[in-house]
Image (spheres, helix red, strand yellow):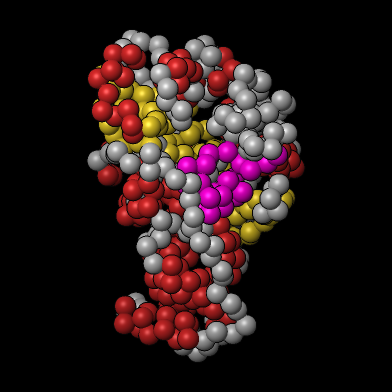
Amino acid sequence: MVTLRSCVLLLSVIGSQIQGHSIPHNKELIHSDYSKDGVIRCFHDNSQTISTDHIIKKLSHCGHHRVEIWNNNDQFIDIQMSIKKFNKIDKISKKLGMNCNVMIENLNTVIQDTLPQNKRDNEILMQMLMDYPIRTDDEMFNMETNRGIHTKLTEYFFQEYRDLQSLQIWFNVLQQWFPNILTLKSIGKTSQGNDLNVLEINVNNVEKNPKGKTIVITGGTHSREWISISTVCYIMFSLLNDYDMGINGEDNILNSLNFIFAPTLNPDGYEYTWVEDRLWRKNRQDTGNLDCPGFDLDRTFGYHWQATNEFPCSGNYNGDMPFAAMESSLWDTYIQENFKRHHDHRLYGFIDFHSYSQEILYPFTYSCDELPNDIENLLELAFDLSKTIRKFSGKQYDVVQSCKDRDADINPTGGSGSMLDYMYDKGAHWSYQIKLRDTGNHGFLLPPSYIHPVGREGTRIVQAMCDFLLNPPNWN
């Protein structure tokens, strides 16, 4: 096995050999000012029916100019608002009829904790990644050393969140590391000219996977949820590396299932969170209102889509027709073209990673009165995943119907057009949305120190799901 010393030596060789590549230019991170904003958490009796629109209106009428709901469940609601009112938290509690306390005192401070601490380190890493593949013919780079080097590089890669340009480089490098089983594809261009990339893993094991059953895993639907993107990337590399290292041999899940990964489903929005507004949620597409671009991708899919009463400036705006967002439209075309024959069940499972609140959400989103025909099976796997995480990391992930996460039981249009429902309808009858850590101390703004532990957690979720599907319980 390659030693750390030899890895360091080879990394220094890679870093010193610049052969026609240039270090990517990183724009300065100049973000919107959130120094006057914080987040409060208000607890309520789980028998209460809490409308997020009602909360926003109440606080707005009290002079809170920027009010946004971060999270709403049957226990509490998290609200971003002006810190000027924090000294009147008792009055806010009385106004809302809930017990409220401060969760994040200053958003700017927490935002800064998510950003790369050393820009030069990122530049060096990107240079290493770009230079590494072109040296694979060197006699120093045998198979065992290759494995050790790209494992060490990847460990370093996940020490920080990476911007869109860095991720694109890493995707290309992965394709060169695993050329026989990994294919990088652009399924189209976004409104800002970025590639909407998918990475397909297929080992072509006809004996174990004759129908080509496929699991789809996505992240970054909401651009501020950086942990979802790093987690999808972490899972993808873990599966590839385990297969390459021969872990579990013929029983490796890649022999029995194909995978499609879309780590950055919203590349325009993600890029914007790096250079302008860390808390931006939507894509960056023109809405017809020059001051308010962007659609909420997770409300634009054409299954039980309904127009909402939201304006373009709202973080939940979903347009005036299904698939108004270019990203959801490109995704629909890709799914339709690759899984035309619905009856062959090739599109087998789906996980859409989000943050935050540690929840496992199951269909349907559009209505709390409607349930999938196979709800018992969905629930059995969901609770199995929750148990697996609890045993693996000690973290509690609650199982929740996705409609309750979106106020669909209060506002029928609130749950329309979700990707979860759309993928279930397209044949992925094992479909879930996973909301990752944490439960509120950082919200959408997990520090980079969480990347590895949450990545390992996400990997265990996918492995447990695949084990369940490949060795199902006896339901007879």
Above or below for 149 versus 259: below
Tell me the quarter of the picture where residue 330 sits. Answer: top right
Percent across and percent down for residue 92 are 31, 19
Seen from the viewer's position, the closer of residues 280 and 322 is: 280
Residue under the point 56% across and 69% down: 25
Above or below for 3 versus 122: below
| Left or right side of 161 for 259 | right
Residue under the point 45% across and 17% down: 61
Is residue 187 shown to the viewer in this render? Answer: no
| Left or right side of 373 for 333 | right
| Left or right side of 329 for 237 | left
Seen from the viewer's position, the closer of residues 357 and 185 is: 357
Where's the N terminus, which quadrant? bottom left
Percent across and percent down for residue 452 are 35, 55
Assess whether residue 405 is covered by the magenta stretch.
no
Percent across and percent down for residue 34 are 42, 42
Assess whether residue 265 is covered by the magenta stretch.
yes
Percent across and percent down for residue 269 are 58, 46
Q: What's drawn in magenta, residue-wise?
A: 260-286
Where's the C terminus, which quadrant? top left
Seen from the viewer's position, the closer of residues 255 and 259 is: 259
Is residue 164 shown to the viewer in this render? Answer: yes
| Left or right side of 300 for 31 | left
Residue under the point 33% across and 31% down: 84
Tell me the quarter of the picture where residue 154 sits. Answer: bottom left
Residue under the point 45% across and 21% down: 60
The number of callouts visible is 0
